[in-house]
Image: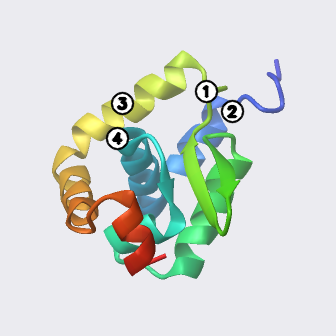
Amino acid sequence: MVGNVNTPQALQVFKCLSDETRLMLVLLIAQEQELCVCEMTHALQESQPKVSRHLAQLRQCGLLIDQREGQWVYYRLSPQLPAWAREIIQAGGEGSRVQVAALAQRLAKMGDRPTRRAALC
Protein backbone atom coordinates (compact mmCIF):
# COMPACT_ATOMS: atom_id res chain seq x y z
CA MET A 1 0.00 0.00 0.00
CA VAL A 2 1.39 3.41 -0.94
CA GLY A 3 0.70 6.21 1.52
CA ASN A 4 0.11 9.89 1.01
CA VAL A 5 2.69 11.37 -1.36
CA ASN A 6 3.80 13.83 1.36
CA THR A 7 4.09 11.15 4.05
CA PRO A 8 7.43 9.35 3.95
CA GLN A 9 7.49 5.58 3.78
CA ALA A 10 9.81 3.47 5.96
CA LEU A 11 12.26 2.67 3.16
CA GLN A 12 12.58 6.38 2.26
CA VAL A 13 13.19 7.35 5.88
CA PHE A 14 15.88 4.75 6.43
CA LYS A 15 17.60 5.57 3.15
CA CYS A 16 17.59 9.28 3.98
CA LEU A 17 18.93 8.72 7.46
CA SER A 18 21.59 6.22 6.35
CA ASP A 19 23.98 9.06 5.47
CA GLU A 20 25.83 10.51 8.48
CA THR A 21 25.51 14.12 7.32
CA ARG A 22 21.77 13.81 6.72
CA LEU A 23 21.30 12.01 10.04
CA MET A 24 23.17 14.73 11.96
CA LEU A 25 21.19 17.45 10.16
CA VAL A 26 17.88 15.83 11.11
CA LEU A 27 18.95 15.19 14.70
CA LEU A 28 20.19 18.74 15.14
CA ILE A 29 17.05 20.22 13.60
CA ALA A 30 14.90 17.96 15.80
CA GLN A 31 16.72 19.25 18.88
CA GLU A 32 16.78 22.92 17.89
CA GLN A 33 13.30 22.96 16.29
CA GLU A 34 14.41 25.18 13.38
CA LEU A 35 17.74 26.09 11.77
CA CYS A 36 18.95 28.00 8.74
CA VAL A 37 21.59 26.72 6.32
CA CYS A 38 24.36 28.94 7.70
CA GLU A 39 23.76 27.63 11.23
CA MET A 40 23.98 24.05 10.00
CA THR A 41 27.11 24.63 7.91
CA HIS A 42 28.79 26.15 10.97
CA ALA A 43 27.67 23.40 13.36
CA LEU A 44 28.63 20.55 11.02
CA GLN A 45 31.73 22.34 9.70
CA GLU A 46 30.70 21.42 6.16
CA SER A 47 30.43 23.48 2.98
CA GLN A 48 27.20 25.25 2.11
CA PRO A 49 26.74 23.30 -1.16
CA LYS A 50 27.12 19.96 0.64
CA VAL A 51 24.68 20.91 3.40
CA SER A 52 22.18 22.34 0.90
CA ARG A 53 22.35 19.18 -1.24
CA HIS A 54 21.61 17.00 1.80
CA LEU A 55 18.80 19.30 2.95
CA ALA A 56 17.21 19.03 -0.51
CA GLN A 57 17.30 15.23 -0.24
CA LEU A 58 15.73 15.37 3.21
CA ARG A 59 12.96 17.62 1.87
CA GLN A 60 12.37 15.29 -1.08
CA CYS A 61 11.92 12.28 1.16
CA GLY A 62 9.45 14.17 3.35
CA LEU A 63 11.47 14.53 6.55
CA LEU A 64 11.93 18.30 6.43
CA ILE A 65 10.05 21.37 5.32
CA ASP A 66 11.55 24.76 4.63
CA GLN A 67 10.37 28.33 5.00
CA ARG A 68 11.95 31.39 3.44
CA GLU A 69 12.30 34.51 5.55
CA GLY A 70 13.96 37.22 3.49
CA GLN A 71 17.27 35.85 2.28
CA TRP A 72 17.30 33.05 4.88
CA VAL A 73 15.74 29.63 4.52
CA TYR A 74 14.80 27.83 7.71
CA TYR A 75 14.31 24.08 8.02
CA ARG A 76 12.25 22.11 10.49
CA LEU A 77 10.86 18.60 10.78
CA SER A 78 7.80 18.07 8.64
CA PRO A 79 4.57 18.28 10.64
CA GLN A 80 3.35 15.45 8.39
CA LEU A 81 5.85 12.98 9.86
CA PRO A 82 4.10 9.91 11.20
CA ALA A 83 4.63 9.01 14.87
CA TRP A 84 6.86 6.04 13.99
CA ALA A 85 9.25 8.34 12.06
CA ARG A 86 9.41 10.80 14.97
CA GLU A 87 10.19 7.89 17.30
CA ILE A 88 13.04 6.80 15.02
CA ILE A 89 14.46 10.32 15.01
CA GLN A 90 14.15 10.53 18.79
CA ALA A 91 15.90 7.16 19.19
CA GLY A 92 18.62 8.30 16.79
CA GLY A 93 19.12 11.39 18.92
CA GLU A 94 19.48 9.27 22.04
CA GLY A 95 21.97 6.98 20.28
CA SER A 96 23.95 9.97 18.97
CA ARG A 97 23.72 12.07 22.11
CA VAL A 98 27.46 12.89 22.23
CA GLN A 99 27.65 13.95 18.56
CA VAL A 100 24.47 16.04 18.75
CA ALA A 101 25.66 17.71 21.96
CA ALA A 102 28.91 18.71 20.23
CA LEU A 103 26.95 20.19 17.30
CA ALA A 104 24.63 22.05 19.68
CA GLN A 105 27.66 23.41 21.54
CA ARG A 106 29.05 24.83 18.27
CA LEU A 107 25.67 26.47 17.67
CA ALA A 108 25.63 27.93 21.18
CA LYS A 109 29.03 29.53 20.57
CA MET A 110 27.49 31.41 17.64
CA GLY A 111 25.27 33.40 20.00
CA ASP A 112 21.57 34.06 19.50
CA ARG A 113 19.95 34.16 16.08
CA PRO A 114 20.38 37.93 15.41
CA THR A 115 24.08 37.59 16.27
CA ARG A 116 24.36 34.50 14.07
CA ARG A 117 22.79 36.30 11.14
CA ALA A 118 25.10 39.26 11.43
CA ALA A 119 28.22 37.14 11.80
CA LEU A 120 27.67 34.20 9.48
CA CYS A 121 24.62 34.34 7.31
Front-most of 5 and 80?
80
Q: Disc number at residue 8?
A: 2
What residue did someone put label 3 on?
90
Q: Amino acid at mark 4?
A: Gln
Residue 63: % across, % down: 61, 40
> Looking at the image, which residue is at 60% across and 69% down?
52
Quick one: label 4 or label 3, which is nearer the N terminus? 4
Quick one: label 4 or label 2, which is nearer the N terminus? 2
- Foreground mark, 1 or 4, reads 4
Say what secondary structure mark 1 lies in: loop
Residue 85: % across, % down: 52, 27
Residue 10: % across, % down: 61, 31
> Looking at the image, which residue is at 62% across and 35% down?
78
Quick one: label 1 or label 4, which is nearer the N terminus? 4
- Foreground mark, 4 or 3, reads 4
Q: How many marks?
A: 4
Callout 4–callout 3 Cβ contact below 8 Å: no
Decide: few, some or many residues near mark 1? Use Cα within 10 Å; few <14, some 14-19, many ≥20: some
Q: Amino acid at mark 2?
A: Pro
Mark 4–mark 2 Cα distance, whole angstroms, equals 20 Å
What residue did someone put label 4 on?
31
Quick one: label 1 or label 2, which is nearer the N terminus? 2
Q: Disc number at residue 81?
A: 1
Determine whether, in the image, residue 59 is placed left or right of residue 109. Answer: right
Mark 1–mark 2 Cα distance, whole angstroms, equals 7 Å
Q: Amino acid at mark 3?
A: Gln
Decide: few, some or many residues near mark 3? Use Cα within 10 Å; few <14, some 14-19, many ≥20: some
